[in-house]
Every structure is written in C-alpha cells, then in structure tokens.
Amino acid sequence: MLKGKAEQLEDNGQILYRDFPFPSVIRLRHYVRVPYKEIPLTRRNILERDRHACQYCHYKGEQLTLDHVFPRSRGGGDTWENLVAACVRCNVKKGNRTPKEANMILRSQPRRPYSSLHFELVKHTRGNLNHEWRKYVIGI
C-alpha cells in the first residue's frame, strides 16, 4: 500500500502505526499470480478439510482420530483420498473393514484440497474473526 501496489478497502479498527489503520481487506491494483503450493498431508490439514467433524456420524469434539477408509492392513495408504476424520467410537466400530463392510456411510468422499489459497482462506475465516471479508469472498 505504501508503494501504491494495493489500496485499503476495509480496516479492523486498530491502528498499525500512528494514523495508519490496520488493513483487513486490500485490493491489488494489478493481478499477482500466486503459484500453486502443495498442501501437506498432515493430521491438522485433514481435520481442517473435514471441518473437525467425524465423517461417519458428524460428531464434533476433541476426540477425533484419523481413519483409513480402505484399511492399511489391506493395502490402503496414507493419502488424502484414503484418510478421514473419525470419532473414536466410529473408528473402533469400523475397525479393519471398509465402510460398506461395516454398514457405515461416509458423509463425503475424501479428496485432496484443490487450492492452497482457498484452503488457507477457509482455515482463517471459519472462526468468523474477519467479518469484513464476508462481502468480498464467496462461500464464507
């Protein structure tokens, strides 16, 4: 903003420096290409993708584990498409079986997050901390 590459649209009411408000929404004057960044396969990122909810019963709480949809003992790997958040109860109930064999319904098909920018945005806006963003970003 100081170099004129962006302009402030919204601030959060805090002062960054003297009379310079802390920006919460800026608009770039020229498009800047953001390179694709691979999202690492971590427990935290899987829980974020699954919105911290069991993918079998929708339980939301502290007692979430990671479940291999196709069990590791049968050749299932540690991939975005094979790991889901599951509560301890559902994980134990499913055990060493597929969801179909355990008569359990997987609420959504697990997949790799397609955009690191979207993934990061959703992570930072899920707590509704940035109310100013709502009128600029679709889907939050």
Image (tube, rainbow, N blue to C red):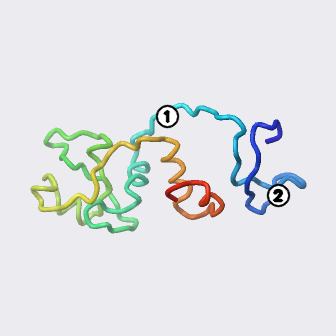
Q: Which mark is residue 52?
A: none
Q: Tell me: 48 left or right of 121.
A: left
Q: Quadrant of residue 89?
A: bottom left
Q: Say which residue appears at 77% left-offset and 63% top-offset.
A: 13
In this view of the protein, which residue sits in the foreground, 31 or 89?
31
Q: Residues within 10 Å of mark 1 (few under 14, many from 20)?
A: few
- Which residue is under mark 2? 15
Q: Quadrant of the N terminus?
A: top right
Q: Above or below — where is 101 with respect to 31?
A: below
Q: Which mark is residue 37?
A: 1
Q: Above or below — where is 32 with respect to 123?
A: above
Residue 104: percent from left, percent from top: 17, 62
Q: Tell me: 33 left or right of 106.
A: right
Residue 27: percent from left, percent from top: 70, 45
Which badge, 1 or 2, comes first in the chain's sequence?
A: 2
Numbered disc 1: secondary structure: loop
Q: Residues within 10 Å of mark 2 (few under 14, many from 20)?
A: few
Residue 9: percent from left, percent from top: 74, 53
Identified by mark 2, the residue type is Ile
Q: Say which residue appears at 32% left-offset and 45% top-offset.
A: 111
Identified by mark 1, the residue type is Lys
